[in-house]
Amino acid sequence: MAKRKTIPVEHLKERFNNYFLNSDDREEATRTNMGSMLADILISSGNYHGFQYLSKGNMKKSMFGTTIGIDQEKPEAEWFIGTDSSRVNYF
């Protein structure tokens, strides 16, 4: 039997999302680059269904991260001020 040469896109997306949630705050540049790569993979394979920014509620589950992607406790015009745009979750 031939060895499998591909991995399911869903598995890859889960691993990336796990990194976006659990990585250390200092890894923002890496998360940004990985997010671009994942979006390209999802779009190219017909599996892109959008994303959401991670909130304080989401980040409570994080092992090492404290920064948030959106702060909905502020007025809407300020939701992204002082946030980390690499804290995302892809659907």
Image: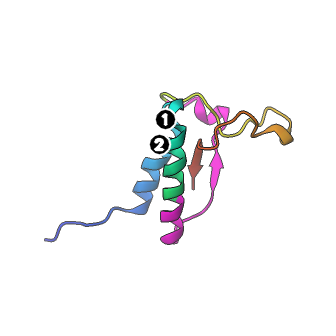
Q: In this view, does 11 lie to the left or right of 83?
A: left
Q: What stretch is highlighted in magenta?
A: 39-62
Q: What residue type is labelled 2?
A: Asn
**Coordinates of residue 36 in the picture (x, y in percent):** 54, 56
Q: Distance between the residues labelled 2 and 1?
A: 6 Å
Whether residue 45 appears in magenta in the rendering, the answer is yes
Task: Between residue 32 and residue 87, name the one nearer to us.
Answer: 32
Q: Residue at x 70, y 39 (%)?
A: 70
Residue lying at the far front of the rendered structure: 29
Whether residue 50 appears in magenta in the rendering, the answer is yes
How many numbered dots are placed on residues in this image?
A: 2
**Coordinates of residue 13 in the picture (x, y in percent):** 46, 54
Q: Which residue is drawn at 52% across and 64% down?
A: 40
Task: Between residue 42 and residue 37, name the one nearer to us.
Answer: 37
Residue identified by numbered label 1: 22
Q: In this view, does 2 lie to the left or right of 15?
A: left
**Crowd tier of the residue under label 2, counting other residues whose Cα lies within 10 Å: few below 14, some 14–19, many 20 or above:** some
Q: Residue at x 54, y 60 (%)?
A: 39
Q: Which amino acid does label 1 sit on?
A: Asn
Q: Judge whether 81 appears above or below 12 on screen.
A: above
Dividing the picture into quadrants, the one containing residue 11 is bottom left
Residues at discs 2 and 1 in contact (Cβ within 8 Å): yes
Question: The C terminus is located in which quarter?
Answer: bottom right
Checking the image for residue 18, the label placed there is 2
**Coordinates of residue 81 in the picture (x, y in percent):** 76, 36
Task: Between residue 75 and residue 91, name the one nearer to us.
Answer: 75
